[in-house]
Image (cartoon, helix red, strand yellow):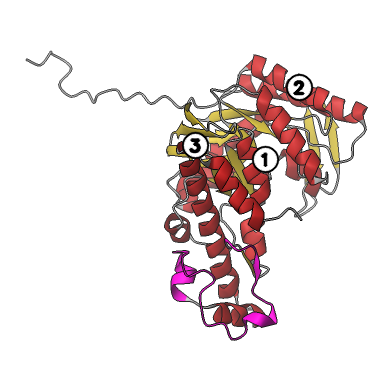
Amino acid sequence: MKRRGTACRAPTIFVEYMYKLIHKDKHTKARLGKLTTAHGVVKTPEFMPVATQATIKTLSVRDLKDCKLQIILSNAYHLYLRPGVELIKEAGGLHKFMAWDKPILTDSGGFQVFSLSKLIKVHDEGVRFQSHLDGSWHKLTPEDVVGIQGGLGSDIMMPLDECVKYPCEKDKAELAMRRTVEWAKRSKTASRKKSQLLFGIVQGSSYLDLRKECAMRLVDIGFDGYSIGGVSVGEPKDLIWEIAGFTAELLPQNKPRYLMGVGEIPDILHAVSCGVDMFDCVIPTRNGRNSVAFTRSGPMVLRDKQYINQHIPIDADCGCFTCRTHTRAYLRHLYKAEEILGLSLISLHNIYFYAKIMREIRQAIKEDKFLQYKKKLDRTYKRR
């Protein structure tokens, strides 16, 4: 018998946006996890292709779904400057604006502010910078950056942080780290939807003691996940690997760990073995636009003369649209003729390849065979 006054009420559906650790590899620190967001579940470890300006260069949303992508990354700095947050809000948010119905992570734009701005002034309150597009001046506080990403409606947002170049004097790195922590505190208390996850960003340049202090202070504040920032900014590979492994060890087991801006295959494999869960990089598409296709035999530079008469796919076992449909000879012709289609097709192959590699990594962890899988790929993708 129905109770009075309740017949027309829809049931309350509660979704807990969280990370669940599912399995740990027996021979490494690699982890299998599940991150629940407002727009779907992300199985980790996972690689996020970069859709800087609400698009992965040369690829359509249909292409992305064909690649079985779980999540993509977009950039708050670029979207704030163009086309503007208000226009995206009018469209119903970033997901509707770009017709992508799966999870989106937005980078705060801190790295872009420091690397692209013509002029920049940093103070404890925030940053004042000159746009790389038209020279106009803008001011952003940590609260502003959370508000911008709130307007975009991303599933995972990053707080404003101060990223320093390598090499960096320790006193400057320490100042940037402490400022990053203070900005993180303010970001945590800024108004945002409960469905939008906020990650903390560990800074400290190449100084492990600063990294440790930053990580501990961020964990005390408490975030939905933690990012390792300020790497791949000019330091040698060995140092990137050391920082990633050292920092990951300091972060909570029950929260996702995200290594920002790192995407070469050996780097991903090493970081996964250290317990890192998420990655992003422009490498697959940037290389694709330069005729470089990734394969199980290593990178293939399709503009090279040796492919002029090769009427076979990049990889017969690949499964992507490019490999099912076109040949190396045709792709080389398109690149040499400066046809946009060539850049798109090779980029599509690379994104598909990365997505497939991540699925294989997850399967290998599940079967406690990640170390064997890693050694096999490492032999192909030798560190350069």
Q: Residues within 10 Å of mark 2 (few under 14, many from 20)?
A: some
Q: Where is residue 293 drawn, in percent x and y?
A: 61, 66
Q: CA distance from mark 2 to mark 3?
A: 30 Å
Q: CA distance from mark 1 to mark 2?
A: 17 Å
Label 1 close to label 3 by CB (< 8 Å): no
Q: Residues within 10 Å of mark 3 (few under 14, many from 20)?
A: some
**Quarter of the view holding residue 112:** top right
Q: SS for tag 1?
A: loop
Residue that extends furthest to the left in the rendered view of this protein: 1
Q: Where is residue 381 drawn, in percent x and y?
A: 66, 56
Give the main secondary structure, helix, strand or loop, of the magenta stretch: loop
Q: CA distance from mark 1 to mark 3?
A: 26 Å
Q: Which residue is mark 2?
A: 212
Indicate whether residue 304 is drawn in magenta: yes
Q: Where is residue 334 drawn, in percent x and y?
A: 60, 80
**Residue under the image location 61 percent in, 35 percent down:** 276
The stretch of residues the image draws in magenta is 296-325
Q: Which residue is mark 1?
A: 260
Numbered circle sitting on residue 368? 3
